[in-house]
Each structure stands twice: as C-alpha cells, then as structure tokens.
Image: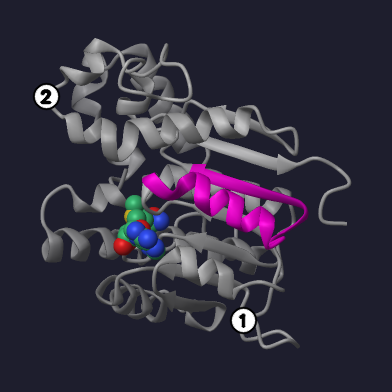
Amino acid sequence: MGSDATNDLNKACYHDASETQLRDFYAAKASINTNFDVPSIPPTIPKVYQETVARFGKGTAELAISHFQGVIQNFFVGLVGAKRVLEIGTFTGTSAIYFANALKRNGVEGGPDASGNMPLVCLDISEEFAQIARDNFEDAKVDDYIQVIVGDAHESLASLEGQQFDVIFIDADKVSYTAYFEAALEKQLLAKSGLFIIDNTAMKPAVELIDCPIPLSKDTIPESALSHENINGYRLFGYPIHEFNEHIRQDPRCEAVMLPIFTGLTLVRLLDNLNN
Ligand SMILES: C[S@@+](CC[C@H](N)C(=O)[O-])C[C@H]1O[C@@H](n2cnc3c(N)ncnc32)[C@H](O)[C@@H]1O
C-alpha cells in the first residue's frame, strides 16, 4: 500500500474510475488535514518509498502502509490519547514515522521516560531493514522517539514484559499474528483502554477462505483454495490470517472490528476489568 493515495488516480482517469475508486480517492484527499504543526503526511515519506523501491525493487514500497492508512492510524493514536506505541514489523520505517508524528501531536516529548523507555518501540527481525529505518527516522527527525529492537518478535515481545503501550500495531509475519496477540495479552503489554491495530486481516488469500471452518484441516480446506495457483499465498497468509480472525472473534476478553479498508485493518480493544 505504498503509493500515495492522492496520486493513485489522476484527473485523466476520473471518467474511467468506478464509484468505489472515486469515493476512496475523495476520502483520502478529504482526510489529509492541512492545519497541523505536525503535518498529516510526514514530508520525508515519499523519499522512504522511493528509496525502498530503488533498493529492493518494484512493488516493495507496497509492504509499507500508504499515506491514507498512516493518516487513519494516526487518528486512532490521537483518539486513545496514546503516549506509547509498540510496532511489530517495521520494515524501512514508514508506519513508525507516522506513529512518531502522531505521538508528537499527542504532546509526547522525545527521549526516554523516567523508566528509560522510549515512546515508540519498533520490532523487526532484519538488521538490514532496521538500519535503513533508523536512517529514515533521523531524516524524519523522529529518531529521539524510537527504540528499534532487532530480533524475532516472539522473543522481543517477551523481553518487553513490565512495559505498557497504548497502541500495539501488528504488521509482521502473518503466520505469527495469533502468537503475537497472545504474547501481548499474556505479558499485559496493552494498557487499559489501549488499542490493537492489526494490518492485512482481509488479505485476498484469507478472504477466499470465507466459508472455511476452523480448525482447518486438509478435509476442510476448500477445493478452490487448494487449486489456487498461488498456494503459498494460502499457507503463508490465508490460513494463519483466517485463523487469527476467528480466534479474536471468539475471544471473550476483547471486542474486535474489522474495517474492510486497504487489505483489511482490524481494531481490537480489551473489555473492562482486564489489565487493571
Ligand atoms: C509488511 S512489513 C512491515 C511494514 C511496516 N509496518 C511499514 O509500514 O513500513 C513486515 C516486516 O516484518 C518483519 N518480520 C517478519 N518476520 C518477523 C519476525 N519473526 N519478527 C520480527 N519481525 C519480523 C519483516 O522483516 C518486515 O520488515
């Protein structure tokens, strides 16, 4: 989702655009406020997209969230008045730069708090991505908001026990979504009244399992899924995301809602009396 939502359609193709495309385009433009000291769209983000593509190839900027998604996520960060955010899956830094700006807008100062913890903690398994992200954070003048922890998020999450975050964004390997969610709950990483934002929950391979029951077994996987040319799409994304969606839908500890925007964005809040 890396392209600029406001550039996805240009005037020349307005007449060819579907009503849905036009509505998306109009909504994206109408959501970009122009009256903030901290701008809706961080000025260095286009450069992050360009350099990501130059370095890793065409289409790789789509691993990052789009401008429109950044603007929407920041609205949620503002809504819960977040002071601390945890990001699982950072890549070259786009969503983190958005989050840091949202924290700034919430009045959060850069630098460590009294316990030595930074406002935004970013987890990624790749040292290469982490170093690029750090450079991009410096460029965006948000490096004093962010601690990057390199390693497998399963282990990094365990190391955060004792800390709390107002927003937890899950956007790493899809196979591990349920494990990350459970680890965050078990370690009580989400503050009371906090919010999980989980990306890609309506990715195409998951959506195609629409009638597929849980638990999944070879017998219950629909023929259409097995004959799909991109079978890895189902294994890597479809099944684990579908299982995760069912997992949280049936979880009495939380309330979940999936927004059918981008490739699916799920919001989860804990019900009262948890993490008191
Ligand atoms: C979709 S990208 C994240 C995009 C990022 N949120 C953005 O908007 O730019 C997923 C990231 O998850 C990381 N990742 C994959 N498996 C991981 C794991 N087990 N632990 C931590 N990070 C992981 C990848 O290295 C990759 O950078």
Q: Quadrant of the N terminus?
A: top left
What residue would you read off at disc 1?
110
In front here: 231 or 74? 231
The percent coordinates of residue 192 (x first, y second) are 80, 54
The percent coordinates of residue 266 (x first, y second) are 55, 36
Quadrant of the rendered image containing residue 109: bottom right
Disc 1, disc 2: CB below 8 Å? no
Q: Residues within 10 Å of mark 2 (few under 14, many from 20)?
A: few
The percent coordinates of residue 21 (x first, y second) are 34, 21
Ligand 1 within 8 Å, label 1 CB: no
Q: Any magenta on residue 152? A: no
At label 1, which amino acid type do we have?
Gly
The percent coordinates of residue 97 (x first, y second) are 46, 65
Q: Is residue 266 above or below residue 123?
A: above
Foreground mark, 1 or 2?
A: 2
Quadrant of the rendered image containing residue 272: top right
Range shown magenta: 175-198
At label 2, which amino acid type do we have?
Glu
In front here: 269 or 77? 269
- Left or right placement of residue 73 versus residue 276 in this view: left
Q: Any magenta on residue 180? A: yes
Q: Residue at x 66, y 71 (%)?
A: 161
- Left or right placement of residue 24 versus residue 157 in this view: left
What residue would you read off at disc 2?
229
At numbered mark 2, what does the secondary structure look like: helix, strand or loop? Answer: loop
| Distance Cα–Cα, label 1 vs label 2 | 48 Å
Q: Is residue 101 above or below residue 145?
A: above
Quadrant of the rendered image containing residue 229: top left
